[in-house]
């Protein structure tokens, strides 16, 4: 699943480390989310979207053609 986390985070001038602390996850989790290596739980996706003041659909891009799965 693709997302706009890195773009939004950088626009708001928040470091990966600070964003991780805010969300209660590791910096590595933020990095993995941004590179698409990790799909968040619905709870974490909601927490991220709510922090940005956005809808989940505005942060995460669901690829219906790929069933929402990452290509390996």
Image (cartoon, helix red, strand yellow):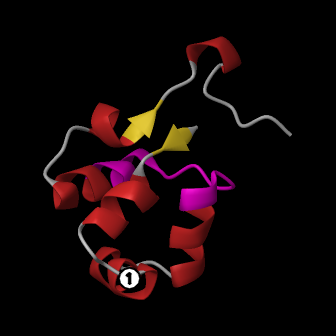
Q: In which quarter of the image is the C terminus?
A: top right
The x, y position of residue 53, in whole percent, is 13, 51
Instruction: Give the quarter of the figure containing the N terminus.
Output: top right
Q: In this view, does 40 lie to the left or right of 35?
A: left
The front one of 35 and 29 is 35
Q: Label 1: how many residues lie within 10 Å, few (<14), some (14-19) or many (20+)?
A: some
Q: Is residue 14 left or right of residue 31?
A: left
Q: In this view, does 63 lie above or below 13?
A: above
The residue shown at (42%, 39%) is 60
Q: Does the magenta stretch include residue 43?
A: yes
Q: Does any portion of residue 35 appear in the rendered image?
A: yes
Q: Position of residue 25 (x, y in %)?
A: 45, 78
Farthest right residue in view: 72
Residue at left 54%, top 59%?
A: 34
Is residue 51 one of those drawn in magenta? no
- Magenta-drawn segment: 34-46
At horizontal 34% and vertical 77% (from top left) the residue drawn is 19
Residue 44 visible somewhere in the drawing: no
The quadrant where residue 13 appears: bottom left
Query: In this image, 35 relative to 40: left or right?
Result: right
Residue wearing tag 1: 15
**Residue 41 image offset from top left, x and y in percent:** 47, 50
13 above or below 53? Answer: below
């Amino acid at each position: 699943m693709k997302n706009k986390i890195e773009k939004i985070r950088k626009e708001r001038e928040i470091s990966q480390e600070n964003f991780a602390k805010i969300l209660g996850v590791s910096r590595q989790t933020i990095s993995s989310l941004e590179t698409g290596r990790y799909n968040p739980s619905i709870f974490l996706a909601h927490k991220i979207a709510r922090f940005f003041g956005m809808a989940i659909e505005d942060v995460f891009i669901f690829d219906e053609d790929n069933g929402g799965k990452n290509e390996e």
